[in-house]
Amino acid sequence: MATLTELPQIERLPLAHLVLPEDHPEATKTRETPVFAYLIHHPDGVILVDTGVGRGNAFIEEVYQPSIVDVVDALAGCGVDHRDVVAVVNSHLHFDHCGQNPSFYGLNVPVYVQASEVEAAKQPYYTDSTWALVPTAQLRSVRGDEDIAEGVRLIATPGHTVGHQSVIIEGGETLVVIAAQSVWSASAFSTMKPEDSNIDDDSLRKAAADSILRLRSLNPSVAFFSHDPRVYRGT
Ligand SMILES: [Zn+2]
């Protein structure tokens, strides 16, 4: 992957706050969780990783009681017009990662999702399909790893879901990982033991561990997560 001479600025966008239902696998540890998206200020234009929670789904509103920040407003707060975003990446298609994708539908911006995740999202109860269903003209189905800009690579990190992907940003001597929900917490990334509760399907257990190993083997200086405000810092 061609690298940039300088690491682009990466900003975290707090896009929602959820109250986890009692039977949620993570609810034994915490009932409330933030939902973060990330913004990469790439020299070619802004890249957005995940879009938070959408509005208007009665089931999600009742079960998760989301407090939602509008992605358009959050971007504006960072000095970015959402119409200037040059690429949207969904780490996966659960409702809290693609919820405001529709703010970008109809614009001339590609939306990158793993092909296997697009397939998985067709299952009932997987997500809100009105949020997750990327218009064909904008969908970029990724199969494995793909460079989407100089110094920016998507890599398949299955585990939480079959088509979960992470983003690597490399500039100068520095490599940063947006690990999204590969793990729930920064501590799991440190110990390289993904939480059982973060794995959707038992058959993905080994894949989840392999994905963390793969990300850690890149020796990232920093790794960011979707639901943990803590940051992993490499040595
Ligand atoms: Zn998820």
Image (tube, rainbow, N blue to C red):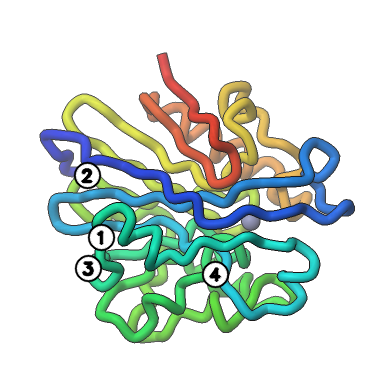
Q: At 60% across and 80% down in the image, what residue appears?
A: 129
Q: CA distance from mark 1 to mark 4?
A: 19 Å
Residue bearing the label numbered 2:
151
Q: Secondary structure at mark 4?
A: loop
Going from N to C along the chain, the mark reached first, 4 or 3, is 3
- Tell me whether circle 4 and circle 3 mark residues in contact (CB < 8 Å): no
Q: Is residue 2 above or below residue 146?
A: above
Residue bearing the label numbered 3:
84
Going from N to C along the chain, the mark reached first, 2 or 4, is 4
Residue 80's disc is 1
Q: Secondary structure at mark 3?
A: helix
Q: Is residue 192 above or below residue 119?
A: above
Going from N to C along the chain, the mark reached first, 1 or 4, is 1
Q: Residue furthest right?
A: 23
Q: Is residue 97 above or below residue 150?
A: below
For the residue marked with disc 1, what is the amino acid? Val
